[in-house]
Amino acid sequence: MIAPGRAKRPGAARPPLDPPSPDELVSCPFCAGHEDMTPPQTLVLPEQGDWKVRVVPNLYPALDRQEVVVHSRRHIRSIAEAGSDELELVAEAWRRRAADEPGNVIALINEGREAGASLPHSHSQLVWLPEPPPRRASPRGELVLESDQVTVSSPWASRVPYETVIAPVELDTDPFASAWLGPTLEVLADVIRRLHRLEGPVPLNAWIEQGEGDWRLVLFPRLTILAGLELGAGIHVNTLPPEEAAARLGSA
């Protein structure tokens, strides 16, 4: 449901990201030099020299197997700040861990406490589910960007402002064996940078979603608070029409 007028209601202001705390760098377990603050790594890339991407078990897993992929040895707060070399290594880490530990694995990113992130250092989660997640139909939408590798669109039934779908141009069934995974992550970082230019740093979620014979990366910014209508009835009230979101992101 698209309802732009809802953006003007009292209390509709978006939740800001927490500002950096004074001891954030000192206490961050994901920064280089703090490796002893995490469980032993399951993968480090590159394998020789200083690491750039590191994978460790999640200390507080929601399910039996859950791992954290640290996106950089630098203290960056968003995947939008990762370099191309780091993003390609993140994609490689997702591929390698999914191949090493076969199962119903899902990759997801939480940025900001309101989006479920407990630590600000940019990272993603690999979660092994007990059964395959529901497969969803490919959403139609307004085109934001297009290259010879991926397309970016705003779904016509977007649930939140700036919800975005990034998908390979060619049909591809397995994201973790896909040559398009790295380019898709790079485009995700670009779209988030555009979002930051429009709205400033915002809490967000992103995840790999598999459909019937294809896969996509979904970006779900938390510019509005999900309330009872969304959670109880499954009716999402979006204050920004998808065609306007697509135009803004495309020109940002």
Image (cartoon, rainbow, N blue to C red):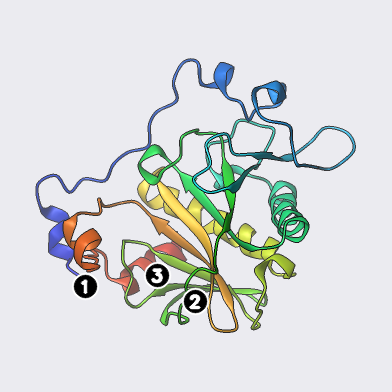
Element under disc 1: loop
Are the two marked residues, 1 and 3, in contact with CB atoms closer than 8 angstroms?
no
Could you tell me which residue is drawn at 61 percent across and 73 percent down? Answer: 150
> Residue pushed farthest right?
48
| Secondary structure state at the residue bearing disc 3 | helix
- Mark on residue 246? 3
Tell me the number on the disc at residue 1. Answer: 1
Pinpoint residue 21: horizontal percent, then vertical percent. 44, 20
In the image, what residue type sits under mark 1? Met
The amino acid beneath tag 2 is Arg
Q: Which residue is depicted at the point 37% across and 62% down?
A: 162
For disc 2, the marked residue is: 135
Which residue occupies 46% across, 44% down? 111
**Residue 91 drawn at (x, y percent):** 70, 56
Of the residues tagged 1 and 3, which is closer to the observer?
1
Looking at the rendering, in which quadrant would you find the N terminus? bottom left
Instruction: Return the residue nearer the eye: 251 or 209.
Output: 209
| Residue that extends furthest to the left in the rendered view of this protein | 10
Q: In the depicted view, which residue is nearer to us: 136 or 60?
A: 60
Q: Earlier in the sequence, mark 2 or mark 3?
A: 2
- Could you say whether the residue bearing mark 2 is in a helix, strand or loop? loop
| Spot occupied by residue 164 in the image (x, y as percentages of width and height) | 44, 66
Which of the labelled discs sits on residue 221, or is there none?
Answer: none
Among numbered discs 2 and 1, the one appearing first in the sequence: 1
- Crowd tier of the residue under label 3, counting other residues whose Cα lies within 10 Å: few below 14, some 14–19, many 20 or above: many
On the image, the x and y values in percent for residue 229 come to 17, 62
Name which of mark 1 and mark 3 comes first in the sequence.
1
Q: Is residue 229 left or right of residue 34?
A: left
Left or right: residue 203 compared with residue 11: right
